[in-house]
Image (cartoon, rainbow, N blue to C red):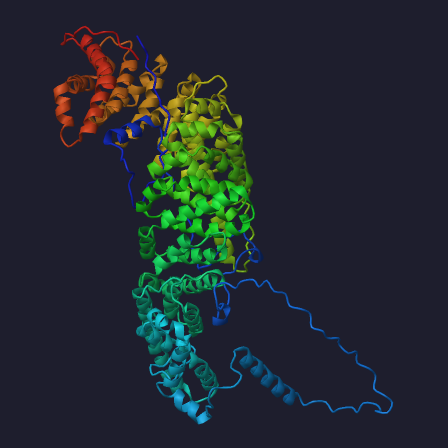
Amino acid sequence: MVKMKSSRTKSTVKPATVIGGSPSQPKTSAEIISEARSSLRILKTQRPFTPKDDQRKLFGSTSSRAPENRPPSAFSLHARSFEGSDSRPISGARLTPIDHKPKIPTSPSKDEGPPVPKPPLDPIEIKRVSNARARLFKVASQGNLLPDKVIHPEETMKRLNSDSSLNIKGFSHDADESALSQFNTNILANENTECGREEMILPTRMREHVGSLSTQTSLGSEQTKQDSKLSTCPGNTEIIKQQQNRTGNDVEHLCKTCSSLHRTLQEGNLLGKMCKRRSVLLKTLYKLVDVGSDQLSIQLTKLILALKVSGKNLLNICKLMFKVSRSENNDVLFQNDNILDCLVEVFSLADPLGNIDAFLYCMGTIKFLSGNMILLKDLLNKGLVETLVQLMKEINDANRTSDTYLCSSGHLLVQVTATLRNLADLPQSWSRFLSTGALLELCVVLEQHINDKDICTNVARIFSKLSAYNDCCLALSECTNCYQLFLAILNRHQRKQDLVVRVVFILGNMTAKNNKAREELYKQKHSVETLLTLFQTYHELDVKGKITPVKTQNKSEVDETKNQRFSEVEDILIKLIRVIANLSINTEVGSALSGNQTCVDLLIKVLEYKTVDKCEELIVNAAASINNLSYYQVKNSAVRTRQLHITELLMKLLLCNNMDAILEAARVFGNLSRSKEVRDFIVQKNVDKFMITLLDAKHQDVCFAACGVLINLTVDKSKRPILKQDGGIKKLIDCLRDFGPTDWQLASLVCKTLWNYSEKITNAVSCFGEEETTELLELLPVYLDEEIVLDFDSNGFDEDLIEHHKVCWESEFVPVGRQLLHRIQCHHSHLEPLPLSPLQD
């Protein structure tokens, strides 16, 4: 007779569930059932959590860049920051030196006598003179040494309280007619030969808009002075409130004027650099920056960008948008007027390396806005993924030939990768990442900036999200250089926990999905050594409770940070062990790891010092890895060498209140119980009774694991009576009745256990019991009737599941079920059995 042992299989590790989306090719019901049974344990783990920065900055609070080595997030920006023209040509003329010889002061002559001492100046007088000189130089520098007309104090106050006033944050609806006339005269001044042409270039509507803007801006400086005086004078609160209300109305009107001007220029085909008086118009627009209104800044940006500025002016206008976008309250301003189109268009119209600082702040703006889900979807629809991938490609190509821009492009790529990280949150973006070749370009970015922790972390966050999507994970697995890059990151940045946890999570997803990824990772030089070194490092950190010091005086903050550090270390161990479990699914890798003493020892240490109550996922993952390694019956198996110690540790899991831990321990016992030494230990410690009890769990996987242990126990003749003494026969038949029609693999395992148990049968009733024999004789013929089985399967199951059940029924249950039925019939006095072929394991 052939004795049957539990035929245990290796486990796969399931990646984190994709939230908010589904794979492009969902698994069939048959594949799901097959995966669930063919695996000893499907491990699930959450994607590492990414905290949101409280403040919007170019580089977050966790950035590895020192403040002095990175572009600032805060800066001052005024109208004077802009240049009059986009570029200033370098003059080829050289100035000749002035023919002047300074005179050396001589000592006074004797006739002149000693110098007469002067009395010290009054400090008040000094201050008065200094302030006067300062005002003089300031006015002179602005090209307006003397005012056009004298404004008396009483006239100023009158203007302040009228609708014709304008401070730096607003303007008057009723512009000064003389100023408007003067501006229009200046802007239209030209040679007689070009008068007709100029009239075509600057239509009447455009001249009115520009003149209004200029006039309203010129009135602002006087209003600013009056506002300053009012703010320091008591009793002017009501006046200030009136001015503030008027300012708000003025800004709204000015925004409409800018928008109307934009339409006028667009209708006249004068956008870009087509407008002859473009520089004059830009100067007027630059002055409005000092108004300080975020709403107006949006309109100015849209108009100025449409005029295709470059150089310092492009940088400043990008900085202006950056300042506006730093407040989340302003996100609503970017939902109108197609301003997002203007921002995205910047990258397609300018040279990235020639305008790298401007791109940096423009990209920083888009990064902030991509944190808003409404704007993020809008940016995706505007082709932002495609734009950023092209930008990365241009930077990568340039860095291949020269490292001149490596540092500055690194600052820019931090913003690019952070934005792509946000885009990866949208399931509808995944196909774009694939179609644009984004994964390959991101690998190049990693390779060129392997020492940049910020870039590595952002790219890891992108891959962390995308690798949960089947097609993206497969595409990443086919990037052959990614394995070497990930191992290099783990070697270079071992202590950067937020980076390490994401890299091992990615590797866990990749090795869970296909065998080729397991082979590729394993064959990389020092891959196993890198993973085990990392395992050892974080195991020691976890045991010693070593955390990064926190500069705070608040004890609660210290405790919270300490717990966070502990959880981060534990999370790394969880995901690292998951990689080991996945790698061991491959026969070559699994056989090698099962003989790796360091690997097995580390897994055992986790079981030794951790408890299920506090570290459930870590303990379960460690047990699952040992389960996979214990599958391989190799001569130098480190699991086999330590098998008794492992079984002792697993006893703790059997006695806990956590069903996942109990289930995993039962699975490991199923593999280890192939050894007689372990089977003796199981009986000695009454583990067999516990396994029989688990048959009452009414859970298919639990019953399957318990049957795996019991079938191995029945290999020993001396241990077979245990089944009947503890009610095992009755419980096995209950499992057959309850789960047979939906789980033919479990039904097959139950029949194999009963087959081993009844090897020396002489009478079916005395062997199984009268009630048990009767039930088996009723169940087995029904389960062996193909028409009944197919009719049952067709009720509520899809075609894939029906086909899967049919295959399992035919290949696994029918052979052993027929043999068992034949044996019972042969040893039952009322039945005449039919001859059958010998049963094969």
Q: Position of residue 370 (x, y in %)?
A: 37, 55
Above or below for 642 versus 70: above
Looking at this view, name the residue that lies furthest to the front.
193
For the N terminus, which image quadrant? Answer: top left
Residue 271 falls in image quadrant: bottom left
Taking the image as drawn, is residue 467 in sight?
A: yes
Residue plotted at (43% across, 36% down): 507
Q: Is residue 56 above or below residue 48?
A: below
Q: Nearer the viewer, residue 639 or 176?
A: 176
Residue 739, position as x, y percentages in the image: 22, 27
The reply to whether residue 53 is visible in this rendering is: no
Judge from the rendering whether residue 696 lies leftward or rightward of residue 340; answer left or right: left
- Number of labels in the image equals 0
Q: Foreground: 328 or 777?
A: 328
The quadrant of the picture occupied by the C terminus is: top left
Q: Position of residue 580 (x, y in %)?
A: 45, 31
In the rendered image, the residue lying farthest to the right is 110
Instruction: Report which quarter residue 344 is drawn in.
Output: bottom left
For residue 69, above or below residue 501: below
**What x and y, as percent, mark residue 631?**
41, 22
Q: Residue at x 41, y 51 (%)?
A: 419
Return the residue nearer the eye: 202 or 169. Answer: 202
Between 750 and 651, the one nearer to me in the picture? 750
